[in-house]
Amino acid sequence: MAQKDGYHHGDLRAALLREGHALLAERGSDAFSLNELARRVGVSTAAPYRHFPDRDHLIDAIADDGYVIFGDALIAAVAGASDEGAAVCGILLAYLDFAVEHAAYFSVMFRDRGERPNEVGAGTFMTFADAIVAAQASGHLDPSADPRALGRALWAGVHGAAVLEASGGFVKLGLDVPHEQLVEEIVGLYLRSPAVAVR
Amino acid sequence: MAQKDGYHHGDLRAALLREGHALLAERGSDAFSLNELARRVGVSTAAPYRHFPDRDHLIDAIADDGYVIFGDALIAAVAGASDEGAAVCGILLAYLDFAVEHAAYFSVMFRDRGERPNEVGAGTFMTFADAIVAAQASGHLDPSADPRALGRALWAGVHGAAVLEASGGFVKLGLDVPHEQLVEEIVGLYLRSPAVAVR
DNA sequence: ACCTGAACACCGTTCAAGT
DNA sequence: ACCTGAACACCGTTCAAGT
């Protein structure tokens, strides 16, 4: 909280990530400024370069923090489900909840990373892929379906709904609806679809 | 092509939109620079401000060009369909095609516009909404369903698939697939779902 | 009416120097 | 080992002035 006098608070890296997230929430990822962040944390504009190679890597690190929270939410959804079908539905619900509750993280998690790898994000998706396979094994999802095709369909539907709700797309189109109802529609769509068939 | 000598090519506004789109395709929307665009077109950095109030409005204008192409593609899909059910499927297909064939436009069409209104985009969506209502009337879509709920579900699914394919999200997750197959999966999902039920 | 030239505050990034 | 101070090229934007 209160910074040390001449030299600085023991962990500049953590401070940059914490305040960086706050700045992201205020300004959006386009207007996110590294110099402003440095001023805010109380260091010179060159200081962040001791901890991150450039602006993109710093934003990636913030996104990784988001993926950790996101991954934990998906794991918790699976753990709290009564069966394998409910686990898949729980993941869809957790996905939509995360997008609105952690909009700043979400806005930055699906940026184009170019050459930079994204291990944290890829690890998160494993939870989703595993839940699909498990639901196929238990018969809640069609066992004869290609699990990768199921992954694409489910991920696309829930991701599109999350993006459109979090970025105001539904509002813009006059399709806005309370969050709970949207969740029910999206989850319900897959619940009742024989192509995906959560039973 | 060749610019006039002292004073400039009759239509700077059109040149900015045309070269702006090319620059967008090269650099991405984050790194899109107004000064670089001005140099490229061969005018001073102040010149674009005679035609657009600021950088955001110029990008919005490029996005509007995209919406026109997008809207025409949706209309053509409806016109070329054999019945109202095929029209909805055709729109989904045209949506996915547009996202990959016009990735630069697509990347900028769903930015947060803040206070700036988006009439062109809203108009485009009407084609989609009309196709849904028509398919309900003809019995290709469930007539008892809320058309706005159908709009949300279909839009979310196809938009998510488009975003994930165009931004490399599927590739990142090891879920990449040829474009034609993805199209068939997404359209097929809705074709066979009783919740949405394209018959 | 449409564009230039020059300026302003700001940005990302680098690097020699300080402790 | 970690940070500062000062600099560089660049950016978005403004405005008086030119034709």
Image (tube, coloured by chain):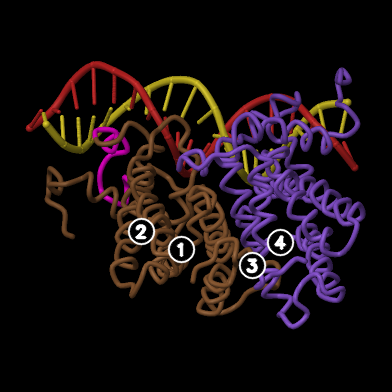
Chain colours: A purple, B brown, C yellow, D red
Amino acid identity at mark 3? Ala
| Mark-to-mark CA distance, 2 and 3 | 23 Å
Point 45% across, 43% down: residue = A173
Q: Is residue A75 above or below residue A195?
A: above
> At which x and y percent is residue B16?
28, 48
Gap in Å between the C-alphas at discs 3 and 1? 17 Å
- Circle 3/circle 4 CB separation < 8 Å: no
Q: Which residues are magenta?
A: B38-50
Q: Which mark is residue A191?
A: 4
- Labels 2 and 1 share a subunit: yes
* Side of B129 relative to B30 (left or right): left
Mark 1 belongs to chain = B
Q: Nearer the viewer, mark 2 or mark 3?
A: 3
- Confirm whether circles 4 and 2 share one chain: no
Q: Amino acid at mark 4?
A: Leu
**Residue that numbered label 1 is attached to:** B99
Q: Is residue A169 above or below residue A6?
A: below
Task: Give amino acid for label 1.
Answer: Ala
Query: What element does badge 4 sit on?
Result: helix
For disc 4, the chain is A
At 69% across and 71% down in the image, what residue appears? Answer: A150
